[in-house]
Image: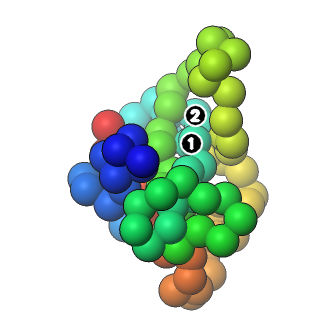
């Protein structure tokens, strides 16, 4: 639980197509998608918000396997263009 609180909304950037373009220009290639409940517990079934954690390379350690998406993916750009308020999506500042 503590890790979920740490990775929640503290130090985040608003999710948008411009934010994705900035991440690409800084050399990031992937985002790790973390689902969190309103009380900052990890939950991928019914998350209150999603935190996208940028990565330049995918981790090779099998213990760090999780849900990743390429920044250039059509899925992320479609999410960024939608006007959905739920789940809220933010980008973690590294």
On the image, numbered disc 2 is attached to which residue?
Answer: 29
On the image, numbered disc 1 is attached to which residue?
Answer: 31
Question: Is residue 65 found left or right of 93 in the rendered image?
Answer: right
In the picture as drawn, the residue positioned furthest to the top comes out as 61
| Residue found at x 25% / y 53% | 11
**Placement of the C terminus among the 4 image quadrants:** top left
| Residue found at x 69% / y 42% | 67
Q: Nearer the viewer, residue 34 or 53?
A: 34
Instruction: State which quadrant residue 69 falls in.
Output: top right
Q: Which of 39 and 50 is in front in this view?
A: 39
Q: Is residue 58 above or below residue 54?
A: above
> Label 2: few (<14), some or many (≥20) within 10 Å?
some
Q: Is residue 16 visible?
A: no
Q: Where is residue 42 in the image (x, y as percent from the top left)?
A: 54, 54
Distance between mark 2 and mark 1 Cα atoms:
7 Å
Q: Where is residue 19 in the image (x, y as percent from the top left)?
A: 42, 58
Q: Where is residue 1 in the image (x, y as percent from the top left)?
A: 42, 47
Total number of numbered labels?
A: 2
> Label 1: few (<14), some or many (≥20) within 10 Å?
many
Instruction: Give residue 6's mark.
Output: none
| Between marks 2 and 1 in the image, the one whose residue lies nearer the viewer | 1
Q: Position of residue 48 (x, y in %)?
A: 52, 73
């Amino acid at each position: 639980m503590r890790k979920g609180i740490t990775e929640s909304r503290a130090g985040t950037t608003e999710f948008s197509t411009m934010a994705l373009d900035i991440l690409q220009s800084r050399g990031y290639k992937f985002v790790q998608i973390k689902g969190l409940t309103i009380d900052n517990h990890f939950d991928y079934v019914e998350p209150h918000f999603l935190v996208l954690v940028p990565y330049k390379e995918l981790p090779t350690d099998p213990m760090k396997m999780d849900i990743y998406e390429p920044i250039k993916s059509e899925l992320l750009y479609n999410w960024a263009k939608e006007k959905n308020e739920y789940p809220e999506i933010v980008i973690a500042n590294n």
